[in-house]
Amino acid sequence: MKAMVLKEQRNIEDNGSPLELLDLPVPVPGKGEILVKVSVCGVCHTELDEIEGRTPPSRFPIIVGHQIVGRIEKAGSGASRFKKGERVGIAWISSACGKCMFCLEGKENLCDDFRATGRDADGGYAEYTTVSENFAYKIPEIFSDSEAAPLLCAGAVGYRSLRLSGMKDRETIGLVGFGASAHLVIQMVRHKYPDSNVFVFSRTERERDFARELGAFWAGDIGEESPEKLDAAIDTTPAWTPIVEALKNLEKGGRLVINAIRKEEKDKGALSGLDYSRQIWMEKEIKSVANVTRRDVEEFLQLAAEIPIRPEVEEYGLEEANKALRELKERKIRGAKVLRIG
């Protein structure tokens, strides 16, 4: 099979082609696993973090990619949930121990043995991949393969972020950063909370225009003051400055949810500008999102089909993975990027 492989940590700015196209043996599904022939795989900012070492893979070489849609090619021994030819999705969560207190409480995203697709197990930048059948999801028929791919990470983690925000109808919400996840969250908000206004903060005019197209009440730059105080805000950026700015716009008792796997060290100095009395006092809350659970993925796919959510996607061939990643790094984004493989 053909696969785009990461052999070592790379800086994309120094080496614009960190992934190498290789011919590899088709993987064999183990006990309880399924072999999936990949149709498409979404391109996520987390891949940049893996490649550049901010969220390093647990081994090299590794096949990255965790927004996978494909069809069952073969089942390993004991695997019986799906039939050959069925379409399934694979998300960021590849496995968890299933025995610890977090797993038993449905918080498998916090399990010490949490393993991520494309970081701890080979992912979807390839023609085939394997996964436990318990961590695969049936894709609603309403979505094409390319539309379904970003739902599996950008959508699912956006859904978890919105749930953790505790938002109610008629409350105001701010979306800080407007990439793959936020452009899906705004569609969730407009469906679930029709009487709520969405305020979008983005560094680029292109993203602000896109937010307005999708129904944002207001869109401005990261450092601008929103015309109304925010009851909740979701930050999807890799930097610290947007958090500092978002806290200024929160209403008393407001909730800020940080939907990011890491924050850049080079921007950490922005925290020195925090003013406790203005930005944190009055019972403002800050909460982080750590990964996703199977429940998040399953519930979100149902909600996405009900709305229905229509992700905006840009397609690339498998061999164009490096190009898609470079454009993502350069913030040449409108919606989500997807590799078409099969």
Image (spheres, helix red, strand yellow):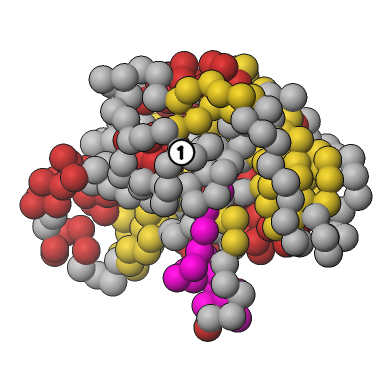
Q: Position of residue 165 (x, y in %)?
A: 47, 61
Q: Is residue 333 visible?
A: no
Label 1: element kind: loop
Q: Is residue 92 above or below residue 167?
A: above
Q: Is residue 208 left or right of residue 107?
A: left
Q: Is residue 89 left or right of residue 258?
A: right
Q: What residue appears at the point 44 percent right and 60 percent down from the top-left corner? A: 290
Residue range highlighted in magenta: 102-117
Q: Is residue 77 left or right of residue 278?
A: right
Q: What residue appears at the point 48 percent right and 47 percent down from the top-left corner? A: 119
- What is the quadrant of residue 295 in the picture? bottom right
Q: Position of residue 182 (x, y in %)?
A: 50, 40
Q: Residue furthest front?
A: 25
Q: Nearer the viewer, residue 101 or 4?
A: 4
Residue type marked 1? Pro
Q: Is residue 195 left or right of residue 258?
A: right
**Magenta-colored stretch includes residue 130:** no
**Magenta-colored stretch includes residue 104:** yes
Q: Is residue 98 above or below residue 229?
A: below
| Dot 1 crowding, Cα within 10 Å, few <14, some 14–19, many 20+ | few
Q: What residue appears at the point 62 percent right and 49 percent down from the top-left corner? A: 91
Q: Position of residue 340 (x, y in %)?
A: 67, 23
Tell me the quarter of the image containing the C terminus: top right
Q: What residue appears at the point 49 percent right and 68 percent down from the top-left corner? A: 113
Q: Nearer the viewer, residue 75 or 182?
A: 75
Label 1, on which residue? 61
Q: Nearer the viewer, residue 9 or 43?
A: 9
Q: Is residue 113 visible?
A: yes
